[in-house]
Image (cartoon, grey):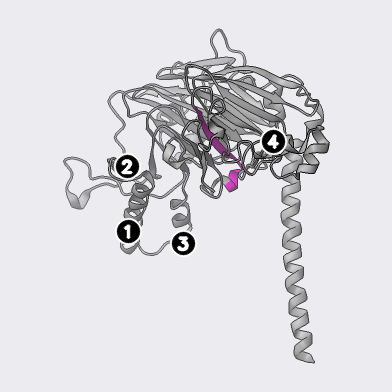
C-alpha cells in the first residue's frame, strides 16, 4: 500500500511538473504573441505597395539603403528592412543592434565573425618559434551567394569583402521580437567608425531615427575610457572615431590579414560535407589546445559549435521542385536550430517563365518578400474579398504579405522570377489552396458542390486538378498531364 501511495505521489508530481512546464511555455508564447501584435488594432492593411529604399547613406567603400520604417506594412509586421553594398576590400565595421535579424547574400562571398571559438594566431614573420605571438579572436566564417545567416540581438559582428565584385546583402530585423526589450525602433550600435548621414544634411539617420553619426565610444569620457582599456588617451581618442567622413564601410588599403579557415574547392564535394570536415578539424584543434592549456568550462565549446548559416541558393537543396515550374527552398529551425532562438525563418523561390507559385496563405507568420531577380505578377487578397495588392513586383523591391492573407505569384513571359521571403516564425507554415495536400483537395465533394453550387463532376475536377503538383505549377495545362513537381517532405 505504501509502495502504491509512493507511486501515485511520484506520478502526480511528474504530471504537475509537466503541467507547470507547459504553462510556462504557453505564457512565453502568449507574451511573444502579445508583443508582436500589440499594435495590431492600428493596422489598416487595405492597400499594400511595392516598396523601394527611401534613404541611402554613402560610405567610403560602399553604401547602405533603408526602407521606410513608417510604411504601414513594415510597422504592422514588426520588421525593418535594409540593403547593404560592400565594395571589394570593403570592411563593414563592427556593430550590433537591438533586434535579431536574418541576412541573405545576393552576390559573391565574404567573411564575417560572430561570437564563437578562440583561434590560434599565426606566427609573425621574422619571429622565433619559441617567441611567436598568438592572435586570439572569434571564429571567422566564409559566406557565399545564397547563404542565409542568423544574427541574434546584441551580437557584435563585422564583415569583409575579399572578392573582386561588390557584396549585396539584404537584412530583415524582427523588431517585434521578444529579444528586443526596447520599443519598435531599430537601433544600430557602432563599435567603430560612424553610421554616416543621409545625403543632404544632419537630420535623421538609418530607419528615420535620430543619429549623432558616431560610435558608442564617442559618448564616454576620454580619460575614463583610457583607464578602462589601460591605454593612452591618444588611443582612446582613436577609439571614438570622430572622423565621420568614411562612414560605416571603410576600405582596407591592402587586404585584411587575419587568422581564418582555408578556402576549399567544392567541385567534387557538397557544401555540407565540406562544413562537416572543417568542423571536425576545428574540434580536433580545440582538443589539442585544451590539452596544452588545461580544461575549460564547456561554455566556449557550446558557442563554437553553433551553426549560424545555411545555403538556400543551391537548387539541389530545394524542398519542392518542378521541371516546368521552378523550385522552392525553405529554411526553418529544424534545419538551422539557431532560428528557434531568434524566431525567424526564410524561403527562396524561383519560377520559370509564366510559371505560378501556388496560391496559399501563411498560417503563423508574416512574410517579407524581396525580389532578387526578374519580375512577376503578384496578387494579395485579404479578408474583405478584394485585392490589397495587384501589380508587378520587380528586382530590388520589397512587399509584405500579412499573416493569413492569400497570395499568388506568376513569372513574366521573358524571364525567371526569383525572390527570398523572410518570415516572422522559426517554423513558418503555409496552407496551399490548390494542388496536392491543399485545402480544397482535402474537402469532400459534397462540401464543394454545395459551397460553390457546382455539379459532382465539376467538384471532382476541382479536387483532382493539379493533384500531382505542390507549391509551383508549370505554365498552361501541360502540368496537368502528369508532369507535376516533386516534393521533398
Mark 4 and mark 1 in contact (Cβ < 8 Å)?
no
Q: Quadrant of the N terminus?
A: bottom right
User: Quick one: 144 or 380, which is closer to the camera?
Assistant: 380
Q: Secondary structure at mark 3?
A: loop
Q: Residues within 10 Å of mark 4 (few under 14, many from 20)?
A: some
Of callouts 4 and 2, which one flags the residue occurring earlier in the amino acid sequence? 2
- Magenta region: 340-351
Task: Provide the residue designation for mark 2.
Answer: 260
Residue that label 1 marks: 284
Task: Name the residue carrying label 3.
Answer: 297
Q: Is residue 23 above or below residue 473?
A: below
Decide: is 477 above or below 277: above
- Front residue of 177/287: it is 177
Residue at figure coordinates x 73%, y 68% from the top left:
17
Residue 434, percent from left and from top: 65, 36
405 is higher (above) or lower (below) than 8: above
Residue 372, image x, y percentages: 49, 24
Q: Depth-wise, is mark 4 or mark 2 nearer the camera?
A: 4
- Distance of mark 4 from mark 3, alpha carbons? 61 Å
Amino acid at each position: 500500500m505504501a509502495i502504491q501511495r509512493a507511486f501515485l505521489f511520484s506520478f502526480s508530481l511528474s504530471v504537475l511538473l509537466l503541467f507547470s512546464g507547459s504553462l510556462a511555455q504557453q505564457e512565453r508564447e502568449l507574451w511573444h504573441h502579445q508583443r508582436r501584435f500589440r499594435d495590431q488594432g492600428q493596422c489598416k492593411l487595405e492597400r499594400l505597395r511595392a516598396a523601394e529604399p527611401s534613404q541611402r547613406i554613402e560610405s567610403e567603400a560602399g553604401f547602405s539603403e533603408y526602407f521606410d520604417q513608417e510604411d504601414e506594412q513594415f510597422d504592422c509586421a514588426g520588421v525593418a528592412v535594409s540593403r547593404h553594398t560592400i565594395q571589394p576590400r570593403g570592411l563593414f565595421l563592427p556593430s550590433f543592434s537591438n533586434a535579431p535579424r536574418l541576412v541573405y547574400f545576393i552576390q559573391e562571398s565574404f567573411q564575417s565573425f560572430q561570437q564563437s571559438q578562440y583561434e590560434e594566431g599565426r606566427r609573425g614573420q621574422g619571429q622565433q618559434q619559441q617567441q611567436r605571438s598568438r592572435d586570439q579572436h572569434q571564429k571567422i566564417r566564409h559566406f557565399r551567394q545564397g547563404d542565409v545567416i542568423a544574427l541574434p540581438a546584441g551580437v557584435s559582428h563585422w564583415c569583409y569583402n575579399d572578392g573582386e565584385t561588390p557584396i549585396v546583402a539584404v537584412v530583415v530585423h524582427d523588431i517585434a521580437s521578444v529579444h528586443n526589450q526596447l520599443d519598435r525602433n531599430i537601433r544600430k550600435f557602432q563599435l567603430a567608425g560612424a553610421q554616416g548621414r543621409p545625403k543632404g544634411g544632419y537630420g535623421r539617420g538609418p530607419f528615420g531615427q535620430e543619429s549623432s553619426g558616431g560610435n558608442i565610444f564617442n559618448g564616454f569620457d576620454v580619460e575614463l575610457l583610457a583607464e578602462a582599456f589601460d591605454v593612452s588617451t591618444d588611443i582612446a581618442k582613436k577609439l571614438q572615431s570622430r572622423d565621420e567622413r568614411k562612414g560605416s564601410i571603410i576600405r582596407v588599403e591592402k587586404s585584411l590579414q587575419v587568422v581564418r579557415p582555408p578556402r576549399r574547392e567544392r567541385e567534387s564535394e557538397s557544401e555540407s560535407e565540406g562544413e562537416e570536415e572543417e568542423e571536425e578539424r576545428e574540434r580536433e584543434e580545440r582538443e589539442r589546445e585544451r590539452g596544452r592549456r588545461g580544461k575549460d568550462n564547456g561554455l566556449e565549446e557550446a558557442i563554437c559549435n553553433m551553426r549560424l548559416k545555411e545555403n538556400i541558393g543551391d537548387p539541389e537543396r530545394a524542398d519542392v521542385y518542378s521541371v516546368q515550374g521552378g523550385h522552392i527552398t525553405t529554411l526553418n529551425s529544424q534545419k538551422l536550430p539557431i532560428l528557434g532562438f531568434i524566431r525567424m525563418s526564410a524561403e527562396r523561390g524561383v519560377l520559370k517563365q509564366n510559371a505560378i507559385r501556388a496560391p496559399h496563405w501563411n498560417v503563423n507568420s508574416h512574410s517579407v518578400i524581396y525580389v532578387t531577380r526578374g519580375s512577376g505578377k503578384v496578387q494579395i487578397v485579404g479578408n474583405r474579398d478584394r485585392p490589397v495588392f495587384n501589380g508587378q513586383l520587380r528586382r530590388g523591391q520589397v512587399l509584405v504579405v500579412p499573416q493569413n492573407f492569400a497570395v499568388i505569384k506568376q513569372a513574366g513571359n521573358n524571364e525567371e522570377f526569383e525572390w527570398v521571403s523572410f518570415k516572422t516564425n522559426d517554423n513558418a507554415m503555409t496552407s496551399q489552396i490548390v494542388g496536392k495536400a491543399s485545402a480544397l483537395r482535402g474537402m469532400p465533394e459534397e462540401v464543394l458542390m454545395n459551397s460553390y453550387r457546382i455539379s459532382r463532376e465539376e467538384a471532382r475536377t476541382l479536387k483532382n486538378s493539379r493533384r500531382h503538383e505542390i507549391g509551383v505549377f508549370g505554365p498552361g495545362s501541360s502540368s496537368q498531364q502528369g508532369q507535376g513537381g516533386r516534393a521533398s517532405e
